[in-house]
Image (cartoon, rainbow, N blue to C red):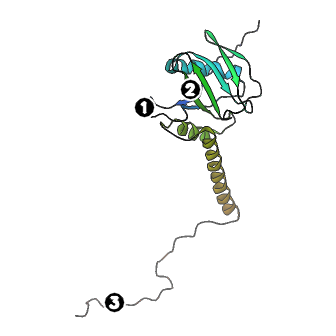
Amino acid sequence: MTTNAAPLLSARLSLTPKTALAGLLDGAWWPRSRDLTAELPPLADALEKRYGRITRVTVNPSRWPVIPHKVPVTGHTVHVGWFTEQDPDKVILLSYTVSRCDLLVIPPETEPAAAARLMAAAAIPGSVLAAGALMSEEAATGRRMRDARSSEDAWEADGGSALPPLRHPVDGARMIMMQSKPWR
């Protein structure tokens, strides 16, 4: 029998606040890897207080290289299933008590700033954005930010810089002298 000497890391999770506003997602999860056997136990433990004991999980197989049928979690086993029709950017967790929790899955390789934006967006109560829509929106935001940085870098690399301030606002302008007492 082998034992895992590495301690379980807590799940990186953002949940919608408890409210009457129901949305398409209940929050976001940012796993550290694509290994469901390693990632599901901390997720199930983190959700147990709010949702009860997680008993089943469904994923889309396009995002997970290996999908185990069962994963041991603290005190019980979670059954794992997959559906190709399920949004690939979402995980569905089922429990005994509350029934269902839908989470956006943020890819493990996502940069921290992008993951933070996605976690915040997925935790908005009453949001009507699906997991795939949030991921597409973030991809577009990331492209815009990269384009803006590359344009600024190109400007600086080509020797461009902001114009220096004018030394005197009337340099080269024609000045008209005013008399000290206005005419009446």
Residue type at tag 3 = Met
Comes first in the chain, label 1 or label 2 = 1
Q: Residue furthest bottom?
A: 184
Q: Position of residue 88 (x, y in %)?
A: 68, 35
Which residue extends farthest top?
1
Q: Who is closer to the viewer here, 107 or 78?
A: 78
Residue on which disc 3 sits: 178
Question: Where, by quadrant of the figure, is residue 84 drawn?
Answer: top right
User: Where is the C terminus found, in terms of image quarters?
Assistant: bottom left
SS of the residue under disc 1: loop
Q: Residue at x 46, y 78 (%)?
A: 169
Question: Rounded to the nearest whole Å, what is the CA distance between mark 1 and mark 3?
Answer: 71 Å
Sequence-first disc among 2 and 3: 2
Three-letter code for the amino acid on which mark 1 is drawn:
Ala
**x, y (%) of residue 137?**
61, 47
Task: Tell me which numbered mark, 1 or 3, is placed earlier along the sequence.
Answer: 1
Locate residue 43, reporting x and y percent.
60, 22
State yes or no: discs 1 and 3 in contact (Cβ < 8 Å): no
Left or right of 46: which side holds 71? right
Residue 101 disc label:
2
Residue 61, how many percent across, how many down? 74, 29
Characterize the local packing of mark 3: few (<14), some (14-19) or many (20 or more) Cα atoms within 10 angstroms: few
Comparing marks 2 and 3, which lies closer to the viewer? 2
* Residue type, label 2: Cys
Mark 1 touches mark 2? (CB < 8 Å)? no
Give the answer, above or below, for where 158 lies relative to 181.
Answer: above
Residue neighbourhood size for the residue with mark 1, other residues' Cα within 10 Å, grouped as few (<14), some (14–19), many (≥20): few
**Which quarter of the figure is the N terminus placed in?**
top right
The residue carrying mark 1 is: 20
